[in-house]
Amino acid sequence: MAAMSGRSVATVAWHCLGVATVVAAVLLVGGTPAEARKEGKQSIGYYELRRGEFSIVVANWGATILSVNLPDKNGHIDDVVLGYKNIGSYVNDTTYFGALVGRVANRIAGGRFTVKGQAYHTYKNDGNNTLHGGHRGFNQVFWSVRERVTGQFPYITFYYRSYDGEQGFPGALDVLVTYKIDGDNSYSVTMYARPVDKPTPVNLAQHTYWNLRGHGRGTILDHSVQIFASAVTPVGADLIPTGAVAPVSGTPFDFRAPAAPGARIADVPGGYDINYVVDGEADGQGVRKVAVVSEATSGRVLELWSDQPGVQFYTGNFLKGDEGKGGARYVKHGGLCLETQDYPDAVHNPKFPTEIYRKGQVYKHYMLYKFSLANK
């Protein structure tokens, strides 16, 4: 039911895109954000969604998740996502803390692809490759608040129009993301995108870093991680998929049974940063359990559900003492990411599910985060 409610919110907001501006303005509810910083003629706003002791805070800069707060087994409330102490750091961010990334998440080999015989060149911001949409991807732009609702199941919907040629991608693209508290200690992320004119690749991802002990409290190497996937898409030295799909059995990538990332990370050069092929049983909406993460000290458990075919498991390999909220220092492996997605570099691998969308088609991406306490 939570999945359906999240989808219906985004659907209602989506229909507003084709309505007159005056109607869209009526849907901009919720008033002035509690805090705002002027950037030119636009304001960076912070928006809290709360249900009891559980809350999340998001910003319209990059449609970013700034914090997720929930109690541990002793009733102590902690923020369990990594983030910066001020919004200026997000403006110059290269870690993608909490961001909505796109137009194409993950990497595009060579910053080049072809659609219907037409070659396109995208901004290379990762050596010779394009990463997370380029130098100014969706994490580096203002999103407008399309709808905001308070109450028992609060939600907020952000909208962004990506213009033709942005970072080299073809065609204009309308994008919506809805963050919604679906119940006690659970929230969903629902993403929709629709090409306006030209065919274009689309692959959005939510890039939150998790530390269930509490942000800034050591590494996640002793967390327990279970990923419902029996294969990965192997990568080369530049983290570009080879095009193969390889079983995880007998490798350090096997998390079908719960295991600590630190137990075998020494056998993975650079640390975990790879796409898993999700293959658990799906419900009638195509939603399946993707992963379960738990942490013994706090007793917190996170379940991730999604309708996407892949999930990038990343262990914060490039963190290097970054200063975060409250003066925290985020050491290497200080957070982990589980980014549901289409397969990386699908534009160069015809055997992968396509990520090309044409006018009249709608990209959909649903995620559900469910939190609980062990043995409760």
Image (cartoon, grey):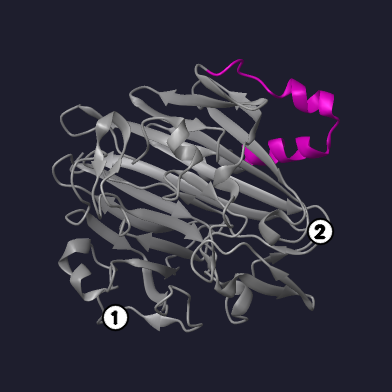
Residue in view at x 42 percent, y 62 percent? 312
Q: Is residue 33 above or below residue 175?
A: above
Choose between 261 and 60: the one closer to the eye.
Answer: 60
Q: Which SS class for mark 1?
A: loop
- Residue 30: image quadrant is top right
Name the residue beneath numbered marker 2: 359
Mark 2: give few (<14), some (14-19) or many (20+) Cα within 10 Å.
some
- Residue 28: image quadrant is top right
State how many labels appear: 2
Name the residue beneath numbered marker 1: 249
Q: Position of residue 71 (x, y in %)?
A: 25, 30
Residue type (three-letter) at the residue carrying disc 1: Ser
Residue in view at x 37 percent, y 54 percent? 337
Residue 20 is covered by the magenta coloring: yes
Q: Is residue 199 left or right of residue 258?
A: right
- Please identify, in this view, whether the residue under mark 2 or under mark 1 is nearer the observer: 2
Q: Is residue 68 left or right of residue 91?
A: left
Q: Which residues are magenta?
A: 8-33
Mark 1: give few (<14), some (14-19) or many (20+) Cα within 10 Å.
few
Choose between 7 and 217: the one closer to the eye.
Answer: 217
- The C terminus, quarter of image: top left
Residue in view at x 43 percent, y 24 percent? 50
Q: Position of residue 373 (x, y in %)?
A: 23, 39
Residue in view at x 77 percent, y 64 percent? 199
Q: How far is disc 2 from disc 1 in space, using C-alphas?
A: 41 Å
Q: Position of residue 26 (x, y in %)?
A: 75, 21
Q: Is residue 161 left or right of residue 184?
A: right
| Main secondary structure type of the part rendered in magenta | helix
Residue 68, numbered label: none
